[in-house]
Image (tube, helix red, strand yellow):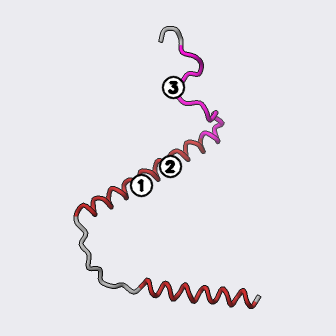
Amino acid sequence: MITHMMALSRILQVACVLAACLAVASPAEAYLDPGTGSMLLSAIIGVAAAVGLAVKMFWYRLIGLIRGKPRGSRPGVVDGPPSADE
């Protein structure tokens, strides 16, 4: 039990030292052009759209399971071979 506590204490010490080293900020001598800002903005919008689509798909599947609809059916699609008129 004592070795487990000592190992946990050591990991905590290393994590604190690592966090302190990462917290020290040095000045960045960098230039970000306007294209970088628009790229970041479009990436954020894309991630938001993907998350929204994933939530929507999950929500419709959840509602379908609750209502008891069959999973394979899609609205507007008729099963079976096409008729001779088509």
Q: Name the residue under label 3.
A: 76
Query: Which stretch is magenta?
Result: 64-82
Identity of the residue drawn at 60% across and 39% down: 64
Main secondary structure found in the magenta portion: loop
* Circle on res. 61: none
Name the amino acid type tagged 2: Ala
User: Where residue 82 sits: x, y (%)?
Assistant: 54, 15
Whichever of callouts 3 and 2 sits on the residue coming sooner in the sequence is 2
Tags 3 and 2 touching, CB below 8 Å = no
Tags 1 and 2 touching, CB below 8 Å = no
Q: In the displayed orientation, state which residue is furthest to the right.
A: 1
Q: Name the residue under label 1.
A: 48
Name the amino acid type tagged 1: Ala
The local crowd at label 2, few if under 14, some if 14 to 19, many if 20 or more residues have their Cα within 10 Å, is few
User: Where residue 56 sits: x, y (%)?
Assistant: 50, 46
Describe the element under mark 3 as helix, strand or loop. Answer: loop
Quadrant placement of the N terminus: bottom right
Horizontal side, residue 69 vs residue 18: left or right? right
Q: Magenta stretch: residue 23 in it?
A: no
Describe the element under mark 1 as helix, strand or loop. Answer: helix
Between the C-alphas of marks 1 and 2, the distance is 10 Å
Q: Mark 2 points at which residue?
A: 54
Between the C-alphas of marks 3 and 2, the distance is 23 Å
